[in-house]
Amino acid sequence: MPDWSAWPFEVEDPYPGYAAAREAAPVQLNERVGAHLVLSHEHAAVVLRGKEWSSDPRNNPQLLAALEEAGTAELLGGSLLTSDPPAHTRLRSSVNRFFTPRAVRGIHDRVAAIVDTALEPLLEGEPIELMGELAYPIPLAVIAELFDVGLEGAEVLGAETPMLARGLELDPAAAESEEVAAAAMRVMLFLVPIVAQRKVEPGNDLLSALIHPPDGGVALEDDEVITMCLLLLAAGHETTANLIGNGAVALFERPDQLDWLARHPEHSLQAVDELLRYDSPVQVASRVARKDLVLGGAEIRAGEQALVVLGAANRDPAHHPDPDRLDLERAGASHLAFGLGPHFCVGAGLARLEAQETFTRLAQSPLRPKPRSWSYSRDSSRTFRRLRALKVGVGQLSEGQSVANT
């Protein structure tokens, strides 16, 4: 299990540290951390795509023991996130149809309406805390509609999902294990009777599709349905909220880019991909070597862990010229923010849509944040690039000044 206290990169701004480490070696064993760090785009892509690498922590006894100690083994064990083909293929096929480009286009108008509602206070000139009032509520409202759980369900999910997301940390805090487990139990208790009802009265929602797959697909067992729901809630909610929060800060810091997006809303998808590349919502992904191999000159033995530093790979100058510059006009800003290969984020299209609608409206708002009218504080997570708070239209701090980094 990695020693995260020895993590060599700053949480507030890890990118200079990433660059220095990557220049020293694209793949390197950090003995203090206790894992191989994969820092270049080329080698990160090899690991994420390669069959020689496993996402299952059971291939590394120390990782499995750490998850059990943190109380997240049950939440993550055998899930879409921590399984390998063919089990992963079966689980993924159960949700794919809800996240195809066609399915995402089909809910565009509803997502746009959700974003409009969330943005009303800012459009009316009122100060907002963007993370709590915009970044988190938007993906929550969307997933609640996909599950068709109504207002009561949205309230339950909204209250419990932030703690569920803590269970996805690669450096799980044992002190939070009871809270993570309690949040998961409350969501499960809420979902179990709904799953039972959808068994006999299926609808057009995601829960029903998991129980009654179309076209002869394989139905998930009840416990698999619940685990899938917990993962979609935690992973989808957290990463999309981080995308919105980080993207907003990047645009506030570069008002010229906000101006460009206001003039070119038709390029909002390109803009979102550049924001994903520039400040990836997920910074680190874990894999375990299935066999002895050599990667980027580093010898890695079977069972050893590699930490793919997505934030470093996305700013690799060998792949992106001038990588530390935010440029929404950058065409084809390929990135690894959603992963690659079998574990490419199943909800990537939906996350992009939510971000497109949010950033386009922020850019076109006549009351968008002015210089010296916003401030933020950043969470200490190493797994996620996460803001704790983003206050807009409040205070007189210098533009983009970070407060109370925790």
Image (cartoon, rainbow, N blue to C red):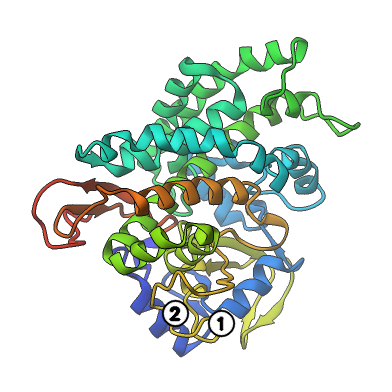
Query: Which label number is shown at residue 323?
Result: 2
Residue in the image at 72% along x and 23% along y: 204
Left or right of 139? Residue 302 is right
Disc 2 secondary structure class: loop
Of residue 9 and residue 236, the one placed in the foreground of this image is: 236
Of residue 142 and residue 181, the one placed in the foreground of this image is: 142
Residue in the image at 76% along x and 37% along y: 94
What residue is pinned by disc 1? 319
Q: Count the numbered circles shown.
A: 2
Residue in the image at 54% along x and 86% along y: 318
Disc 1 secondary structure class: loop
Left or right of 91? Residue 270 is left
Query: Which label number is shown at residue 1?
Result: none
Q: Residue 71: give x, y in percent of width and height.
A: 49, 38
* Residue 362 is at least partly visible in this image: yes
Residue type, numbered disc 2: Pro
